[in-house]
Image (cartoon, rainbow, N blue to C red):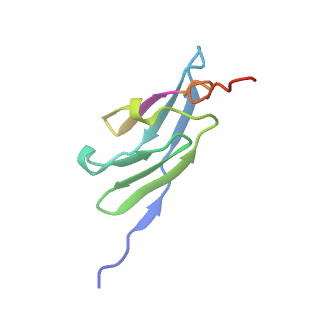
Amino acid sequence: MAEDKIKISPDVCSYVNDEHRKLSLEIALPGVEKKDIKLKMHEDSCNLIAPREDFDYVTALTFCCPVKPEEAKAKYQNGLLKVEVPFKDPMEDTTEVSIQ
């Protein structure tokens, strides 16, 4: 029976841009192949699994404010995954109520 690999949390730096319009994540994943990175994102969180030969990087993050996951952009280079995603406009899903 194959032995389960240990799980390690990657170094993550998250910050908001100067205009407070988008969230940036920088995730250190040295030794990981780009094709092996699995990043899933919701409006309020994300989940990452990035296996290496000797262990797996895993993390789940929650966000301070809702984001637009369908507009997220990610780039992986030299062991660093950079993700940018815009915040959702707080009035985006509002419904106007008729007043009688």
Image x and y of residue 13, in percent: 54, 36
- Outermost residue, top side: 19
- Outermost residue, right side: 100
Figure check: 27 above or below 60? above
61 and 41: which is toward the camera: 41
In the shown orientation, is residue 42 left or right of residue 96? left
Image x and y of residue 69, in percent: 44, 36
Where are the magenta residues, as a range? Answer: 82-86
Please tell me which residue is depicted at 61% across the width and 28% down the height of the picture: 94
Figure check: 4 above or below 52? below
Q: Is residue 84 magenta?
A: yes
Please tell me which residue is depicted at 49% across the width and 44% down the height of the picture: 42
Please tell me which residue is depicted at 39% across the width and 59% down the height of the picture: 56
Q: Quadrant of residue 62?
A: top right
38 and 6: which is toward the camera: 38
Classified by dominant secondary structure, the portion drawn in magenta counts as strand
Q: Does the image show residue 72? A: no
